[in-house]
Structure formats: C-alpha cells, structure tokens
Image (cartoon, helix red, strand yellow):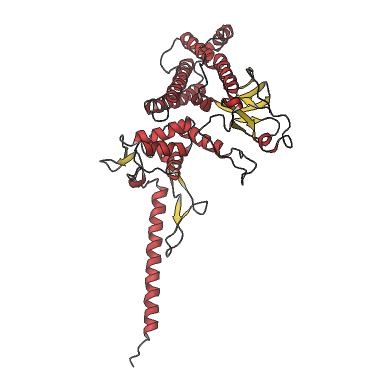
Amino acid sequence: MLRYMPNEMILTFLMSQAQSESESMSSNIRWGHQARFKQGIVHYNYKNFLGYRKGSDGEPEIDENEAPTVRRIFARYLMGQSVGQICKDLTADGLKTARGGTDWSDHTVRHILQNEKYMGDAILQKTFTLDLFSRQQVKNEGQLPKYYVENAHPAIIDRDTFQRVQEEMARRSSLRKTSSKAKTEQGKHSGKYVLSGLLVCSECGSPYRRVTYMPGGQKRFVWRCINRLEHGKRICKHAPTLEEPEVQAAVTAAMNEMFRHQTARQTLADCIAAALAGTGDDVSLPAVEAKLRALQEEQMRLFHLAADAGPENTEYDDRLIEVSTAIAALLTRKGELEQEGIGTECDSRVRFITDALETTGSAIEGFDEGMVCQTVASITVLDAERLSIRFKDGTEIEQIIECVGRASA
C-alpha cells in the first residue's frame, strides 16, 4: 500500500539533512584550517595589511610606497608621541591607510604597533568561528591552540624596535591615574609634555602635573604633585612645587653625567679594545662592541635631529629604522661571540686602559624631549632640591636642582 508523509515531516527531514551536510562541510573546512596552521602556512589579507603586497611568486613582499608610513608610526611612538598625536599627523599629511582612506583612528595605529607580522613573524588562529549558524568570530583566549611562525615573510620593522614598542606600550598602560577625580586607577600617556608620567612624588607616589601661573601678568610653568594640588596638605604634606626650567636643567645635567660616565667613556674603551684585539669587522667581541656603541650614539643623534625638526618632518625616520636594524644585528653577533669566548684575551688590557680614561664627551645643550623619552624611565622628586633620575639602562643619578627662583607650594 502506498503511504504519503505529511508535508511538515518531509520539510523536517530535508532540513535535518541540510544541517547535517552543512555541519560536515564546516567540520571539513575547520580541519583544513587546522592542518594549514600546523604546517605553518600563513594566510595574508593584503586589503588590511599596510606595507605589503602579493608578489609575483604569490608570497608577500614589502611595498616601498607604504612601508615608510609603517616605519614612521613605530619611530614616532618611540619618540614619545601618543597614538592620538600619530593619528592626527598622519591624517594631516594625507597618508593613506591600508584600505586607501586618509582618516586614521586609534584602533588602526594600535593594531599596526601590536602586529607581529611587521617584524616578519605570524601568529596563527588568533580568532575562530564560534559556531556554524552565527558565523561569529571570537578571540582565541586558549580555547584552541595558537601557532607561531618565525620569519614567515620579509620584516619592515626589526625585532629590537618592535619589542621596545611593546615595552613602551606596557609602560604607558601601567601609568597611574593623574587625578584623584578619575574613575579608574589607570592613567593616560601625555605626548604633549615629556615630563608627564615621569615626574613622581616620593612622599605619596602621585604623578606631577604641569600648571601655569600668572604672577604679575607674567606666565610661568611649574610642576606640582597632583595630590598636593587637589587636596592641599591633607594627603601630601611636603611635596615641593618645581619650576619647569629648573627641572629641565636638572634632567639635562643628569643625562650629561650619565653620557660622560658611560656612553662616551665606554665607546672610547671599546675602540681601544678593538685595536688591541688586532682583528677587524665583526670577528672579535671588542670590535662588535665598538661598532655597537657608535651606532647607539648615531641613534641618539638622529633622535635629537628628529625632535628638533618637529613631528611633521619624516626625514630621519628611515635612517632611524636602519640604525635600529643594524644595532639588532650586532647584538645578535655579540651574543654569538660571547658564547664562543672570542675576544676575552684582551680583557685585562681593556680594564687597565678603561681605568685610566678621563671623563670625556660633549654636553647636551638644552632640554631635548626626544632624548629624554628614549633614555629616562622615571624621575622621583626627593625634595625641593633633589631629583632621583632612573635611566632605562638601570642607571640612577641623584641630581641637585639649581634654584633660580623657588615657587611656593
């Protein structure tokens, strides 16, 4: 006997079959993605990948029309500019984003600064599809394995520069709030004044803030502890008010002291050590160290020139990247030589000559915000006459504040 199924049952059966086929197809696609991830095969979305294009061999290659923009973003961030300032400058200069627009957002710049692909590596499976029907992409926070591929493609940014940017981003995100009225404990990096976020009160731990005074109609800039400024002596009783020119002069003096005793002095010692080693190029440890010191001096000089030229000038950005790349290569070579033990035979002679060296080096003239941002980690206000300045290499110097005219707290 021929029997007929109701329409609803037929529809349910067909839908169930279609769902089963979709799930099977989705499973196969996921398996294919997983297999490619395990093999280290990287997929590139060139439409959103500023600085790269698809080469004739199908592999990514650097687009030299776009790469200078990427290098500029990294260089300006390390020079102390905020993400907002970088966006503003890029938009004002009419530089194009990966999609061809000229309106730069904070999200776009931060994504570039945090994208490991710019140093030639790739992290695979950062996101995954939550389920078949919603097709929602969610961030992979341990639900699935991630795969890290080194040297997947040519790098625009050297590893040392990229790592220093990540460290600077972490430092800025850890800044304390700059006002007791703020809703959170997290502060905000100010690219406008380099001393913001660096000057800290030794008594209460609060940051210092730049304040404008107009005594007698004459404008003066001073720095005050935020707790003292907002609450008087109730929270912080002894934090001094510091005149800006005096703080800047003290920081400059400390930087000169640090450079005299370390940078210039060590550079001279390394050059003599290289000569004593009797070897050239990068085959001896002293020779590599001498080159390294020379490049680091050149890097500081370029930062100085870039800061003087202003944020609109990009003349020194490419050279800064080149010098940073060379420094990274020499650091790698130095590590190799240290493991091999090459160059240690002249250590005693180097120490003898180093001890005999007199302090030398040209002084920094004036307060240089670019150099301060690159070298100074923090400045603690000990009292009205002393600052404790800690540099990023770990050096700490207690510096006297030469008073011209003390502001009252």
Judged from this view, the residue extending furthest toward the left is 56
Judged from this view, the residue extending furthest toward the front is 216
Q: Nearer the viewer, residue 319 or 96?
A: 96
**x, y percent for residue 322:** 39, 26
**76 horizontally vs 242: left or right:** left
What count of labels does the image hold?
Answer: 0
**244 horizontally vs 148: left or right:** right
Q: Is residue 150 visible?
A: no
**x, y percent for residue 278:** 45, 9
**On the image, which quarter does residue 4 sit in?**
bottom left
**x, y percent for residue 265:** 54, 12
**On the image, which quarter does residue 30 sit in?**
bottom left
Q: Quadrant of the N terminus?
A: bottom left
Q: Nearer the viewer, residue 79 or 62?
A: 79
**187 horizontally vs 43: left or right:** right
**x, y percent for residue 179:** 62, 40
Q: Nearer the viewer, residue 297 or 379?
A: 379
Relative to 264, residue 243 above or below: below
Which residue is rendered at x = 38% and y = 73% of the image? Answer: 17
Judged from this view, the residue extending furthest toward the bottom is 1
Q: Quadrant of the C terminus?
A: top right
Q: Is residue 253 visible?
A: yes
